[in-house]
């Protein structure tokens, strides 16, 4: 696991396509903004856990031609 320290307004970039911004830090809560290509699904971990438990495909549906 990579552990990074970021301040309000700073960001990290993952594989050049996904940018995670620190929007707000208040008490023990950090708000993030995530910019990612539409074809990359972005979910909270508890949603992924629920989808996996239901064996649901949680990828973004491909556009029809």
Image (cartoon, grey):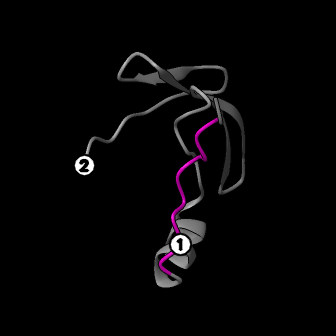
Coordinates of residue 37 in the picture (x, y in percent): 57, 25
Q: Tell me which segment is drawn in magenta.
A: 55-63
Q: In this view of the protein, which residue sits in the foreground, 27 or 42? A: 42
Does residue 59 appear to the left or right of 22 in the view shown? Answer: left
Q: Answer whether residue 61 is magenta in the image.
A: yes
Disc 1 from disc 2: Cα separation = 27 Å
Quadrant for the C terminus in the image: top right
List the residue tagged with mark 1: 56
Does residue 23 appear to the left or right of 53 in the view shown? Answer: right
List the residue tagged with mark 2: 1
Q: Is residue 5 above or below residue 45?
A: above
Q: Is residue 21 above or below residue 48?
A: above
> SS for tag 1?
loop
Identified at 52% across, 37% down, the residue is: 40
Residue positioned most to the left: 1
Q: Is residue 29 above or below residue 39?
A: below
- The total of numbered circles placed on residues is 2
Q: Residue 44 appears in which quarter of the rendering?
A: bottom right
């Amino acid at each position: 696991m990579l552990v990074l320290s970021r301040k309000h307004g700073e960001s990290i970039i993952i594989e050049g396509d996904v940018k995670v911004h620190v929007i707000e830090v208040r008490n023990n809560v950090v708000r993030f903004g995530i910019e990612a290509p539409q074809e990359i699904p972005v979910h909270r971990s508890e949603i992924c856990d629920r989808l996996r438990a239901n064996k649901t495909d949680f990828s973004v549906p491909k556009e029809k031609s």
